[in-house]
Image (cartoon, rainbow, N blue to C red):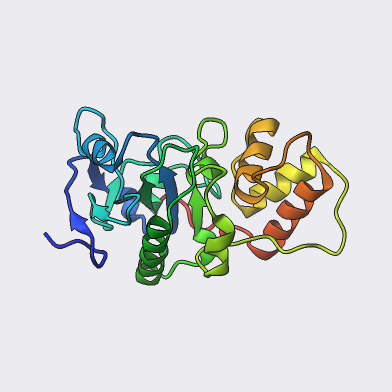
Amino acid sequence: MPADAQGALWHPSPNFGPRRGSATVSLIVIHYTAMAGAEAALERLCDPAFEVSAHYLIGADGTLWQMVREAERAWHAGQGLWGGTDDVNSRSIGIELDNLGDQSFPAAQMGRLRTLLAEVMARHALPPESVIGHSDMAPERKYDPGRQFDWRGLAAAGLSVWPAPLGSEPSPDPRQFEADACAFGYPQAEPDALLDAVRQRFRPGATGPLCAADMAIVADLAHRFPVDRSVRNA
């Protein structure tokens, strides 16, 4: 069976099913494998005993494998929410990147990711804000693709979003921070976990309590990219 993406090596996984309720693709979720090499990850994602999979895996050298057809529901997201949608697997394409989580992502890998994202977004008519990380939808339990991932670079290529500076920075307000983060798509979560998820993506070097810079980020995202909550599970 040919792969959906150009240049992908077809390596089918048994771990998939139909998208529930006639759901259509509205998200792309990026992960890191946290395993010792792409081959180990490929074996795990195609092992029926583990009941996990993804649509695509990109090796550190840029090699691209496809394990599940885009029309099918891969098992990559697990429990979590984005924009009020709880069955993220039925609404998404999952992309795994060969990375332990504490290292930079090689140029060949990121180049292949950019090409793949552009293809998938075009096929499903997805806007840049549809590309999220695993930590975005599951802030209390996931950390991938992590602080080393180049979200700003993806946004510069039109493949994700990046906050624009505001004229002024709002005073720290935990309730408003949560409201704005949720308006962008984040789920309600324990405050420290939600703050960490936002910082992992948009302020990877930041530490300490909620501050004006964090407030400005979510305020801008909520204003420019409010999530379409009409896209729900059927």
Is 34 on the left-hand or right-hand side of 46? right
Q: Residue at x 71, y 52 (%)?
A: 218
Mark count = 0
Identify the image quadrant of residue 125: bottom left
Q: Residue at x 28, y 41 (%)?
A: 53
Identify the image quadrant of residue 109: bottom left
Asked if one can make out residue 214 in the rendered structure from this viewpoint, the answer is yes
Q: Residue at x 50, y 48 (%)?
A: 133
Is 170 on the left-hand or right-hand side of 164? right
Viewer-nearest residue: 110 or 48 = 110
Viewer-nearest residue: 10 or 75 = 10
Viewer-nearest residue: 181 or 232 = 181
Residue 17 horizontal/vertical position (percent): 24, 45
Residue 69 horizontal/vertical position (percent): 23, 55
Asked if one can make out residue 229 in the rendered structure from this viewpoint, the answer is no
Quadrant assignment for the N terminus: bottom left
**228 in relation to 40, above or below:** below
Is 81 on the left-hand or right-hand side of 205? left
**25 in relation to 122, above or below:** above
Residue 65 horizontal/vertical position (percent): 24, 53
- Residue located farthest toward the top when viewing the structure as drawn: 49
Q: Residue at x 38, y 59 (%)?
A: 108
- Residue located farthest toward the left when viewing the structure as drawn: 1
